[in-house]
Image (cartoon, helix red, strand yellow):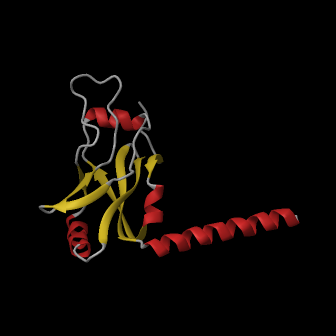
């Protein structure tokens, strides 16, 4: 059997870039059961409403939906269980300090296979205010209008 190489994207949290200012990103491994890996290999997962937190010096990811494996038996996993993330001790201690600041949180950005191993990209983020979101929408619409005008001129 050939070894998997490269990066295969499973799920992405696009809403997070709209709702948060992203400060730093970290790549972390995930502790998964066998049926979770099989379900991920089918490309089924959702990072919407997902978040991470630090408990007793360990990083845990909650509310990430990995659906039950269709051919699974009684050994199937719970779809929204807490999953432990694997990070270096120095990274965890840095995150502990930074998440204590008000308004900071850990958000999963993407879920992917890297060389056959399931990884998650988590981001240290600050929540955007309502006027920041309106400003982002206005910028995006202005770019679209400019692109339309340029296409019409050609």
**Hey, which residue is sitting farthest right in the picture?**
154
Q: Measured from the top left, where is residue 41 in percent x and y?
A: 40, 36
Q: Measured from the top left, where is residue 107 in percent x and y?
A: 34, 61
Q: Measured from the top left, where is residue 2 in percent x and y?
A: 43, 34
* Residue 89 in the figure: left or right of residue 7: left
* Residue 139 in the figure: left or right of residue 63: right
Q: Nearer the viewer, residue 19 or 76?
A: 19
Query: What's the residue at 24%, 63% (across, down)?
Result: 88
Q: Measured from the top left, where is residue 16 in percent x and y?
A: 43, 61
Query: What's the residue at 25%, 77% (across, down)?
Result: 101
In the depicted structure, whether residue 37 falls above or below residue 87: above
Query: What's the residue at 36%, 34% (across, down)?
Result: 39
Residue 75, located in which quarter of the rendered image? top left
In the depicted structure, whether residue 55 falls above or below residue 98: above
**Hey, which residue is sitting farthest left in the picture?**
56
Residue 74, located in which quarter of the rendered image? top left
**Hey, which residue is sitting farthest bottom in the picture?**
101
Query: What's the residue at 41%, 69% (across, down)?
Result: 22
Residue 54, located in which quarter of the rendered image? bottom left
* Residue 6 in the figure: left or right of residue 119: right
Q: Nearer the viewer, residue 63 or 42?
A: 63
Q: Nearer the viewer, residue 52 or 113?
A: 52
Q: Quadrant of the C terminus?
A: bottom right
Q: Count up the numbered dots.
A: 0
Q: Quadrant of the N terminus?
A: top left
In the depicted structure, whether residue 115 falls above or below residue 73: below
């Amino acid at each position: 059997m050939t070894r998997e190489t490269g990066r295969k994207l499973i799920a992405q949290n696009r809403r997070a870039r709209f709702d948060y200012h992203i400060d730093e990103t970290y790549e972390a491994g995930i502790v998964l059961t066998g049926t979770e890996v099989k379900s991920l290999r089918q490309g089924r997962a959702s990072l919407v409403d997902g978040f991470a937190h630090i408990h007793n010096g360990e990083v845990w990811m909650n509310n990430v939906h990995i659906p039950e494996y269709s051919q699974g038996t009684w050994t199937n996993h719970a779809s929204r269980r807490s999953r432990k993330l694997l990070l270096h001790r120095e990274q965890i201690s840095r995150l502990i300090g930074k998440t204590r600041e008000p308004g900071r949180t850990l958000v999963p950005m993407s879920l992917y296979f890297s060389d056959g191993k399931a990884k998650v990209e988590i981001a240290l983020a600050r929540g955007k205010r309502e006027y920041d979101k309106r400003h982002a929408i206005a910028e995006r619409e202005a770019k679209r209008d400019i692109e339309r005008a340029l296409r019409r001129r050609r």
